[in-house]
Amino acid sequence: MTQTESTIWAVMFLVLLVLLIVMGVQSCTVAPEPVTPTGTVALTATALATVTPAPTVTTRPSPTPEAACTITAPLNVRNVPSVSGAVVRTLASGEWVIIDTGQEPVTRDGYTWFALAGGGWASNHRMVCG
């Protein structure tokens, strides 16, 4: 696992932890699972409170500073903010990303591109942020 992948996993774990705290979870137990060659990590959370999910937002808001975004469909991460940039990785539906607030968004090729905290650029057409 590369340092970038490790950083992404650490950020995703922190986002999950913050979400659990915000939603009123009283206790969270993390059951360590062996890391498989694919880099999959299993987390087990025990909730002591019933949580009612918020309504689904159908719009695609633009990321705000320090936004955590979830991917709604497979999304290519590119080395530059353009459809002609090289694909450095593909994000799967359901993955979380953090927007790099040190970079300004770029509008190009009909998309608004955002720099990701783990490196690379992604358009917001398959992200829901907030």
Image (cartoon, helix red, strand yellow):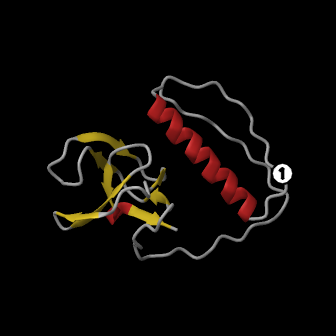
**How many badges with numbers are in the image?**
1
Image location of residue 29, percent across then percent down: 79, 42
Q: Quadrant of residue 47?
A: bottom right
Q: Quadrant of residue 119?
A: top left
* Residue at image point 64% right, 52% down: 16
Taking the view exactly as shown, the residue that stands out farthest to the front is: 102
Image location of residue 86, percent across then percent down: 20, 41
Left of 116 or right of it: where is 37? right
Left of 100 or right of it: where is 51? right
Identify residue for label 1. 27
Left of 65 or right of it: where is 43? right
60 over 35 or under it: above or below: below
Crowding near pointer 1: few (<14 within 10 Å), some, many (20+)? few
SS label for mark 1: loop
Q: Amino acid at mark 1?
A: Ser
Image location of residue 100, percent across then percent down: 43, 54
57 over 48 or under it: above or below: below
11 over 6 or under it: above or below: below
Left of 8 or right of it: where is 107? left
* Residue at image point 63% right, 48% down: 14
* Residue at image point 62% right, 74% down: 54
Image location of residue 108, percent across then percent down: 18, 63
